[in-house]
Amino acid sequence: MAEAFGLYTHQRNNRIRSNFLIAGLFLLVYLTAWGLLLVAFGYGGVPQGRTAFGEASRIFRSWFPLITAATMLWIFIGFRVNVALIGAVTGAKGIAREDNPKLYRMLENLCISRGLTMPKLAIMESEALNAFASGVNDKQFTVTVTSGLLAQLNDAEVEAVLAHELTHIRNGDVKLMVVAVVIAGVISFIGELVFRGFGRSRIRFQSDDSKRGNAIAVVIGIAVIVVSWLLAVLIRLSLSRSREYLADAGAVELTKNPDAMISALLKISGRADIDGVPSGVMDMCFENDPDDFADLFSTHPSVTKRVQALVETAGGRAPAMPPHPPKIAERPDLPSMVEASVHHEIGAGRGPWQRPPAG
């Protein structure tokens, strides 16, 4: 009962989070637009007797409906073509039953067992071992696996990964991640354009009051854009890592094979990074290897923690690991070459002072 309550609570919270993220997108776009206007008027100048702050605020108010409409259009486009966009940046190709009957049948059987709508299937050519789900509704949902994963995992492990991605779809995690990617994508794109443009120019502070005021407006505008970008990143990082634990548990519920999930996690660990794929897409993957900051800024819990959770709550068995060798200080001293020679001579029936017989 507690598990069911936790699952339904997670699904409801995902719907609430999605609405908050969409509202947050509008706020971040408004902040970014005002920052851009500050930079534009501060750098380009304003008529005599006016200030960059006043002009930026005036234009922002007049453009407010247009900015709102553009944001709504961006969300509409993101929701309609997110699968195509992700496919374009990853190179994933959709497959039909006849292209890979075994893989198609695995996913189909999992869907039938729980009465789920069959999502589309796609394969991405990559040596990395990973998978992800995309889409925001039953017509769009797509499960993508890498060719490396299919080559390195056995059937039971592949089935566990497919069940994990199906659970993400079932729990509403995929829609939430798409919204987060849309938010991070638009803000990051604007921020990158601004910093590329102004990275080649120099802002000079002059003694004239109007010029000094314009320079300050540029600095504040850039600061506002930076804050918006950081908030967009924090939105991604704030997504609960519990979604991965729940997806692992859901996969075990579907497959009745916790050991296969554990084995898949251990094989994928350290081999999940897909070259050339945006970080937003990696956040949606089965595993996202942490960077140099390790677990601190990772969107996924570590494989060790996920395996531990499966062992403790799903009845999984961690594979036996070879014993660690004793520490150097605890190892017996190796005999010197002279001592080794003495033992060899004694073992041959001669004293250490005797030479071996000639011939």
Image: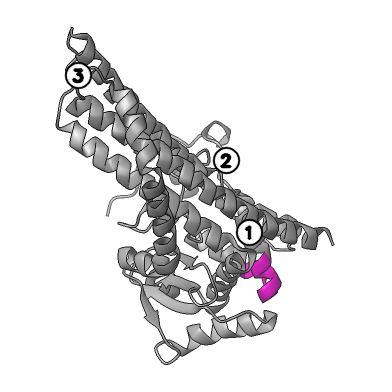
Q: Secondary structure at mark 1?
A: loop
Q: Residue at x 41, y 36 (%)?
A: 31
Nearer the observer, 327 or 225: 225
Residue named by callout 2? 326
Q: Along the horizontal axis of the image, is 190 left or right of 95?
A: left
The residue tagged 1 is 320
Q: Which mark is residue 255?
A: none
* Picture coordinates of residue 182, whole percent (x, y): 43, 54
Q: Can residue 232 be seen by looking at this rendering?
A: yes
**Colour pattern of the rendering:** one colour
Instruction: Report the residue at 51% width, 56% height from top.
Output: 177
**Which segment is the magenta one?**
250-260
Q: Quadrant of residue 73?
A: bottom left
Badge 2 or badge 3: first in the primary sequence: 3
The residue located at (44%, 45%) in the rendering is: 344
**Rendered-image quadrant of the C terminus:** bottom left
